[in-house]
Image (cartoon, helix red, strand yellow):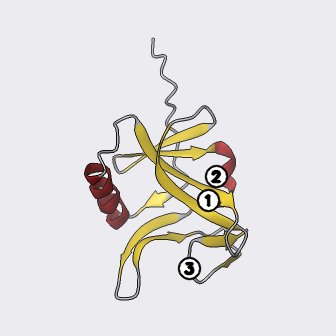
Amino acid sequence: MNTTKDTVVASPINLTDGAVTQLQRIMQEQNVPEDHGLRVGVKGGGCSGFSYLLGFDIQKDKDDVFEINGIKVLMEKSHAIYLLGMEIDWVEGLNNRGFSFNNPNATDTCGCGTSFSA
């Protein structure tokens, strides 16, 4: 009988190949423990109303768990409404370098690309 609390469901978000490559590099460089996953979420604040959360964390009771291209993704169930269909990419350009969030639910975004309203 399997008693683990990991329940993998269809992912509401997508990680591009570039994002996956960078996340795997960061996980290796930072020695992220095996029991941690990539937490994707939102929090109140930022210049447009919400800011994105992206970091490594342990699974909590209120999380849904997804497997995206070999990366365990954690997301609070209540955040899915704001993130459904979002794509996370890695951008490497002359003027910016980092993760970008393409969120179809955002009605407005700020210039920095890390804050949105829905």
Q: CA distance from mark 1 to mark 3?
A: 18 Å
Measured as percent of width and height from the top left, residue 18 is found at 33, 67
Q: Quadrant of the C terminus?
A: bottom right
Q: Residue at x 56, y 79 (%)?
A: 112
User: Which residue is under mark 2?
Assistant: 80
Instruction: Please tell me whether residue 87 is drawn above or below residue 95 in the rendered image.
Output: above
User: Which residue is under mark 1?
Assistant: 83
Q: CA distance from mark 1 to mark 2?
A: 5 Å
Disc 1 and disc 2 in contact, CB within 8 angstroms:
yes
Q: Residue at x 32, y 56 (%)?
A: 26
Q: Residue at x 63, y 36 (%)?
A: 62
Q: Hey, what amino acid is under mark 3? A: Cys
Badge 2 element? helix
User: Which residue is under mark 3?
Assistant: 112
Q: Residue at x 26, y 53 (%)?
A: 29
Give the camera-side residue of 69 and 93: 93
Instruction: Classify mark 3: residues with Cα within 10 Å, few (<14), some (14-19) or many (20+).
Output: few
Front: mark 2 or 3: 3
Measured as percent of width and height from the top left, residue 4 is found at 48, 22
Measured as percent of width and height from the top left, residue 24 is found at 30, 54
Instruction: Classify mark 2: residues with Cα within 10 Å, few (<14), some (14-19) or many (20+).
Output: some
Q: Quadrant of the N terminus?
A: top left
